[in-house]
Amino acid sequence: MNLEQIKLNWQKQLSSSSEAVKPQAEIDLAIQNNMANNMNIITNKMLAIDKKAKERTLYGIIGFSIIICALSALNYLMFLLSQSMFTIAGTTTWIVWFVVSIFRLVKFKHKTHDNSLCIKSALESKLNKVNKEIKYYQTLVYWVLAPMSVGMILILIGSQALIITFISFFIFWVLGMYCANKYNLRYIDKSLKPIKQEITESLASLT
Amino acid sequence: MQQLTLAYQDMLANNLNRLKSIARSYSKNEDREDLFQEILYQLWRGYQSFENKSQLDTWVYRVALNTAISYVRKEKTQPQIVSGNNLTWVEPHHDGEFQDSIDLLEKFLSQLNKIDRAIMMLYLDDMKQKQISEITGQSTNVISVRINRMKQKFQQLHVE
């Protein structure tokens, strides 16, 4: 077959009208629908996804805020019970950590990827973003979990809690931190590294 | 919002088959709907800030190809973003030699790497080399060389 003829067929296929998108529950009805109806379905779907994505972000922020507020209130109570050097140091660490982590989270959240760049720039920008994400999740343990733990431990020591309470809380805390870190590393391996590999391969084939 | 929605629908109606062919070329059967939906969503997000700095066709191709090239299959355990009212993929089908030629091209496209596939699809859609260069970010010379190589490869593989 001649490539030019095939090319024409390809273009005919692209320009022919389509009934390819319709809702699962209304397959029979959709056959009778025109393009405008299909477009409405797609738009509604996009609006729903948009809404869902915004809701997820909101729930994430609310959940994170509740946890932080609860832990801060607990720390404040312990600080009130015993204002020793340890509790002051612990509370200071906690406040500094809180400000720094909120600042970094907001800064990180603001970096969005632009899909309308040319393929080469988009791939480079996306690779840059994925690398930053990987670094972000890999170092989370140092700039979030470690200072948070140090602050908590100092406050616990300063509050002169019973040794059994201290050990139980400490074990529970370490386990929680370990699981959080493990979850982050799993996310890197399962989600971010495959994306990085795809982008690297595509960039290599561009040059 | 109403105006934006109508403009988006209009843009989509003019490009639906292009988007479908991109989703078909860059995914396996079970992932087509996911990728197609992802492309439509990225277009929806981008269209709200589209400023007519480039031609609409070029912009659509950029967003769709960028989404498809860096698309990685999601884990099956991951829940859908929005459940229910799924977009169902219906394969367009033509009879005889016409369909054979499309199948042949799709088979050829699947053998190319993701970047060459994008360039070939743009060439097949009769895009000018300057436009292809704008979409891919490569010089027109490089595009020309790559297209010629792919044409030769196609001739070697499929010309009777």
Image (cartoon, coloured by chain):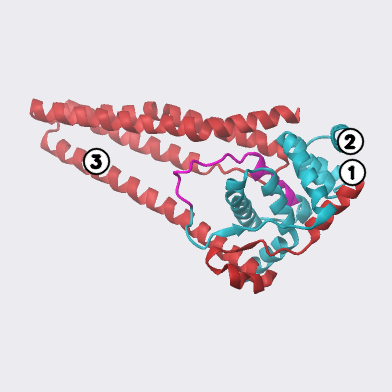
Chain colours: A red, B cyan
Q: Is residue A87 positioned above or below B86 on the image?
A: above
Q: Is residue A161 left or right of residue B129?
A: left
Protein chain holding label 3: A
Residue B41, position in %: x, y? 59, 54
Q: Is residue B3 positioned above or below A162 on the image?
A: below
The outermost residue toward the left is A162
The span from disc 3 to disc 1 (Cα, nearest Å) is 68 Å
The structure residue drawn at horizontal position 34% and vertical position 45%, both measured from the top left corner, is A64
The span from disc 2 to disc 3 (Cα, nearest Å) is 68 Å
Query: Magenta region: which residues?
Result: B59-80
Tell us which disc is closer to us: 2 or 3.
Answer: 2
Marks 1 and 2 close (CB-CB < 8 Å) = yes
Residue B1, position in %: x, y? 60, 68
Amino acid marked by disc 3 = Leu
Near-viewer residue (A166 or A203): A203
Amino acid marked by disc 1 = Leu
Residue A191, position in %: x, y? 50, 35
Is residue B70 covered in magenta?
yes
Location of mark 2 (residue) = B155
The structure residue drawn at horizontal position 45% and vertical position 34%, both measured from the top left corner, is A187
- Please say whether residue A144 is visible from this viewpoint: no
Location of mark 1 (residue) = A3
Amino acid marked by disc 2 = Gln
The structure residue drawn at horizontal position 61% and vertical position 68%, both measured from the top left corner, is A40
Near-viewer residue (B71 or A164): B71
